[in-house]
Image: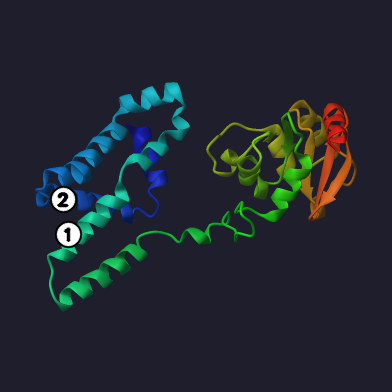
Amino acid sequence: MSEIISIIKNHMGVGFVSVLFVMSLAYLIFAEKDKAKRCLFVHVPLILLAAFLCPISLKIYAKVSGSITYYRLLWLIPVTPVIAYAAVRVVSEIKGFKQNLCIAGLALLFAVSGRLIYTDIYMVDAVNIYHMPATVVDICDALHVEGREVKALVPDEMQQFVRQYDPCIHIPYGREYMMNMFLEEDELKNEMEGERRPYEVGILATQRGCHYIVVPWYQRFDTLPEYYEEYTIIDGYIIYKNVLLSTEVGKLQNDDL
């Protein structure tokens, strides 16, 4: 149960929306008499909430998919519809000028109940139909090999986009570490975030099967990483290609041309 409570705390944001949800649910339990609406806005949320809070549910889910993603079941709980419907019911019971004040007050309350998503450091302006940085698209297109998968070590700012754009490009470690979802140490990650020694990075990346290493030009290695050669430069990023692992990849790329 403590793990479930911890998951809720980590994913409830500032917490005010959760308070509004509980208040709205409590209000509808006593105020809503229509059977169909009561089933939709009271019974279903209560059942889903009870299922999420049940430790047995966590154990079953952990065996199937791993407890690290158990928080996703929170998305099944209709938090927004319950709050919205309760707010409409409250406003509909008020008449005249007071109703306008109530609507304005609720709108303000909702506005300050969370955090503006566009302030997140990982939110970027849409510059193409993929809604991701054009640099990622250009680099992924350069690394893509038709008919097979490749692995590329990419900077943190690209990790959440690469797999969205091209599932054939794998990464040795991903955004899980950026979100602190895993506590295990990763030698390659630590080396890239630490001393970035070319020999050690090359050895570790080769052991992990990385065909490519992508780094910003201003963070380029003083000497070539072990087993890697300079492949190309795209949009201010230098790409190193593994001379051992990429023999077959290079052949396929030449054949495509």
Residue occupying the point 10% across, 52% down = 31
Task: Name the image quarter holding residue 166.
Answer: top right
Q: Is residue 142 visible?
A: yes
What secondary structure is found at the residue carrying circle 1? helix
Residue 27 at x, y percent in the picture? 15, 52
The disc labelled 1 sits on which kind of residue?
Answer: Arg
Please tell me which residue is depicted at 52% across the width and 61% down the height of the picture. 119
Q: Is residue 3 left or right of residue 148?
A: left
Q: Where residue 89 is drawn, which disc sits there?
A: 1
Identify the amino acid type marked 2.
Answer: Leu
On screen, residue 66 versus residue 198, left or right, reads: left
Q: Answer left or right for 97 relative to 140.
A: left
Residue 96, by quadrant, is bottom left
Tell me if label 2 and label 1 are in contact, CB under 8 Å. yes
**Disc 2, SS:** helix
Give residue 109's mark: none
Q: Depth check: 2 or 225 in front?
A: 225
* Circle 2 residues within 10 Å: few <14, some 14–19, many ≥20: many
Q: Which residue corresponds to mark 2?
A: 28
